[in-house]
């Protein structure tokens, strides 16, 4: 099978560097997931732990489930951006049954959808997610003449990616679309090219994110979230969870929080208190992702600039 132009761009662009260091004997290990706002936030947390609290902190890059498992096993201590409802199952397991994880009270409002560029909507007439199940519509996104369109659904390590596969099967477009997985930086580069050349493109999207600032983006309509149409089998309990799950309506309202090892409340209460006081905004996340993916600034440098520009807020977190 010939690779499509869209798929080739995934192979041609290098993955985004996270600016992390291997974990050693530090007091606290901060996990660094594979998306830009979380990478920057991880660097901010680690830097402030050292400069403001005198705690030796190190960064370790892992997928989200790896970070949460590391916290559960005592190998890691902080995840900068745990998304819900994506990770409800993992949070229930680690925070509920095991009691090893805590989520900060302060969260950031978010959203998850399927998106197209405005030019795509105008050229194809696509308006709803369910339109993708129509072979005639899917053909607009077919760049290698294999009879199926292509769409990016997320990075392999993201919990949302597996759920997007379930959503595709629930709506029926798993039969008409090839679901591409790859690093976000590569997907954003492919979207940039499609937008610049006026090519149709459809993709998983989430907010807050800079792509809504960079391009004219349209969110595809779908039925409002209905719990009766969502039934996600636990991935940790059943390797066939995707085939046994369903998600036939929009995502529920999303939000994300800093997560940390429950043991910090006893071993380092000042760290737990600091993490609970951190308040970030959707605008912060948008600016962070723009700096990393558009301006090509390393996450550590973005964090350094953010800290310098937000001293007043930081004083409230470290009081």
Image (spheres, grey):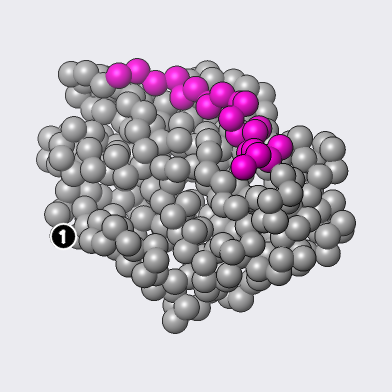
Q: Residue at x 76, y 35 (%)?
A: 193
Q: Is residue 33 visible to us here? A: yes
Q: Point out the stretch of residues depicted in magenta.
A: 1-22
Q: Quadrant of the N terminus?
A: top right
Predominant SS of the magenta segment:
loop
Front residue of this view, candidates 161 and 274: 161
Residue 87, horizontal then vertical, whole percent = 36, 55
Decide if residue 164 is on the left or right side of residue 72.
Answer: right
Q: Secondary structure at mark 1?
A: helix
**Location of residue 213 with respect to 115 vertically, above or below:** above
**View extreme (bottom): residue:** 228
Q: Residue at x 56, y 57 (%)?
A: 112
Q: Is residue 188 visible to us here? A: no
User: Is residue 257 in the magenta section?
Assistant: no
The picture quadrant where one finds residue 275 is: top left
Front residue of this view, candidates 265 and 173: 173
**Location of residue 156 with respect to 51 vertically, above or below:** below
Residue 210, horizontal then vertical, whole percent = 65, 40
Decide if residue 141 is on the left or right side of residue 37.
Answer: right
**Location of residue 304 with respect to 38 vertically, above or below:** above
Front residue of this view, candidates 192 and 174: 174
Decide if residue 27 is on the left or right side of residue 123.
Answer: left
The picture quadrant where one finds residue 263 is: top left
Q: Quadrant of the C terminus?
A: top left
**Location of residue 146 with respect to 16 vertically, above or below:** below
Residue 81, horizontal then vertical, whole percent = 41, 43
Q: Residue at x 76, y 63 (%)?
A: 137
Q: Residue at x 66, y 24 (%)?
A: 295
- Residue bearing mark 1: 97
């Amino acid at each position: 099978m010939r690779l499509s132009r869209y798929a080739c761009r995934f192979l041609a662009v290098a993955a985004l560097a996270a600016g992390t260091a291997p974990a050693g004997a530090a007091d606290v290990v901060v996990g660094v997931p594979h998306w830009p706002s979380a990478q920057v936030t991880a660097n901010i947390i680690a830097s402030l732990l050292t400069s403001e609290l005198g705690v030796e902190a190190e960064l370790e890059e892992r997928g989200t489930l790896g970070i949460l498992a590391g916290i559960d096993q005592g190998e890691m201590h902080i995840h900068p951006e745990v998304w819900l409802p994506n990770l409800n199952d993992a949070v229930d397991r680690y925070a509920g049954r095991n009691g090893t994880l805590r989520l900060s009270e302060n969260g950031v409002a978010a959203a998850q959808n399927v998106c197209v560029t405005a030019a795509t909507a105008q050229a194809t007439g696509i308006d709803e997610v369910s339109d993708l199940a129509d072979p005639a519509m899917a053909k607009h996104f077919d760049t290698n003449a294999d009879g199926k369109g292509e769409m990016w659904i997320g990075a392999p390590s993201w919990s949302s990616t597996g759920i997007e596969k379930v959503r595709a099967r629930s709506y029926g477009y798993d039969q008409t679309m090839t679901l591409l997985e790859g690093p976000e930086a590569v997907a954003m580069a492919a979207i940039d090219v499609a937008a610049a050349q006026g090519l149709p493109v459809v993709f998983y999207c989430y907010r807050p994110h800079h792509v809504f600032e960079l391009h004219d983006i349209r969110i595809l309509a779908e039925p409002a979230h209905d719990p009766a149409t969502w039934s996600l089998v636990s991935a940790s309990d059943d390797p066939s969870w995707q085939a046994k799950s369903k998600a036939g309506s929009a995502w529920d309202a999303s939000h994300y929080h800093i997560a940390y090892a429950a043991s910090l409340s006893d071993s380092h209460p000042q760290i737990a208190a600091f993490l609970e006081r951190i308040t970030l905004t959707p605008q912060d996340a948008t600016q962070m992702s723009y700096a990393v993916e558009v301006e090509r600034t390393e996450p550590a440098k973005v964090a350094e600039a953010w800290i310098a520009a937000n001293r007043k807020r930081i004083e409230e977190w470290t009081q």
